[in-house]
Amino acid sequence: MKAVQYRRVGDSPEVVEVDVPEPGPGQVLLKVDAAGMCHSDIAVMSWSAEEFPYPLPLTLGHEGAGTISAFGPGTHRYSEGDRVAVYGPWGCGLCRACAYGEENYCRRADRLGIRPPGLGAPGAMAEYLLVDDERHLVPLHGLDPVEAAPLTDAALTPYHAIKKSLPKLVPGSTAVVIGAGGLGHVGIQLLRALSPARVVALDINDQKMELARSVGAHRTVRSDENAPEQIRELTSGNGAEAVFDFVGATATTRIAARSVATEGDLTIVGIGGGSVPVGFGTLPFEVAVSAPYWGSRGELLEVLELARSGEVRVHVDSFPLEETPEIYERFHRGEIPGRAVIVP
């Protein structure tokens, strides 16, 4: 089968031929219908040889949807031909976090060498994907797999981040979304669907600011050194009750820290390497700062329900698997405003 692999540190990914995997006990083989492209992939391929944690070659793609093709030995609840989305942050299934469905925070995964597909385990940018356990599958129930695949991260991650701040997003409140790209444009829709807050979107890209307006942002502001002052003007000097930084670079975390209100939430979702100093006098009083990771299995079910109801839709552009290396270059240059989806 064809697969997109990162084969050597510092090189571009390649389309190669590999064997179709054989499912072992309890495992499920999917014929991949769609695989989302994510900035996490770019981050992984930017690591040096010294810090690279995964064995190479690595088949990329941690946002997957497909059709069940075969089962390994054992009893299964699904059937061949079922269309499913893949829950990506695999855990041990036995620790306290996994018992709550929070495999994204599994306490034993690192120790046991359990890795998500595309982030250590072979990923979804291939014609077939081996899933370790069918608890990591969620039925699509009619959703288009090309639109559903990015929901497993590009929607699940902001949903998990936003859900914790909903008690603060009461009528008259303001939520700021920094970065209106792949995750941010979904975050805007989630905020509109789940809260009465005014949503202010920040970006430096005109195309992404237009995308933010088209999916429901009440206001858009250029993400520069003047942005915090504009946000405070919009909020009568108070700042925003919740700020979600979907970029996470030094420049954007600085904006986030200057834009949040007293007792507000500052959530760094992006992995751009930025940070926020926390200490008395560094932020408004009682600001809660967090850096969440992905979301729970239960939250993925909720995200898919929002998609079925039409409340959330990922802006996608689809491409054939053979073009993936070129699409990664375009994605890295910011030429794809929403989410790129690879269709084998």
Image (cartoon, rainbow, N blue to C red):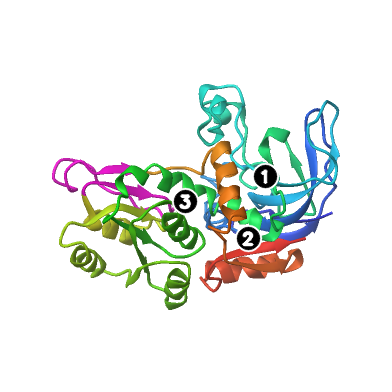
Disc 2: which residue: 11
- Amino acid type of the residue tagged 2 in the rendering: Asp
> Which residue does the image show at 37% across and 45% down from the upper left?
166
Q: Residue 23 location, x and y as percent?
A: 82, 36
Disc 3: which residue: 158
> Considering the numbered disc 2 on the image, is that residue within a helix, a strand or a loop?
loop
Camera-side mark, 1 or 2: 1
Earlier in the chain: of badge 2 and badge 3, it is: 2
Pointers 1 and 3 in contact (C-beta within 8 Å): no
Earlier in the chain: of badge 1 and badge 2, it is: 2
> In this rendering, is residue 124 above or below 295?
below
> In this rendering, is residue 50 above or below 341?
above
Q: Is residue 312 left or right of residue 281?
A: right
> Considering the numbered disc 1 on the image, is that residue within a helix, a strand or a loop?
strand
Q: Is residue 34 left or right of residue 164?
A: right
> Which residue does the image show at 55% across and 22% down from the upper left?
95
Q: Residue 73 location, x and y as percent?
A: 86, 28
Q: Residue 257 location, x and y as percent?
A: 25, 54
> Image quadrant for the N terminus?
bottom right
> Image quadrant for the C terminus?
bottom right
Pointers 2 and 3 in contact (C-beta within 8 Å): no
The answer to which of 258 and 232 lies nearer the viewer is 232
**Region of the chain picked out in magenta, as a range:** 262-289
Query: How far apart, in angstroms, are the residues tagged by discs 1 and 3?
Result: 17 Å
Residue 165 seen in the current view: no
Residue 215 in the magenta stretch? The answer is: no
Earlier in the chain: of badge 1 and badge 3, it is: 1
Mark linked to residue 86? 1
- Amino acid type of the residue tagged 3 in the rendering: Pro
> Considering the numbered disc 3 on the image, is that residue within a helix, a strand or a loop?
helix
Q: Is residue 141 left or right of residue 331?
A: right
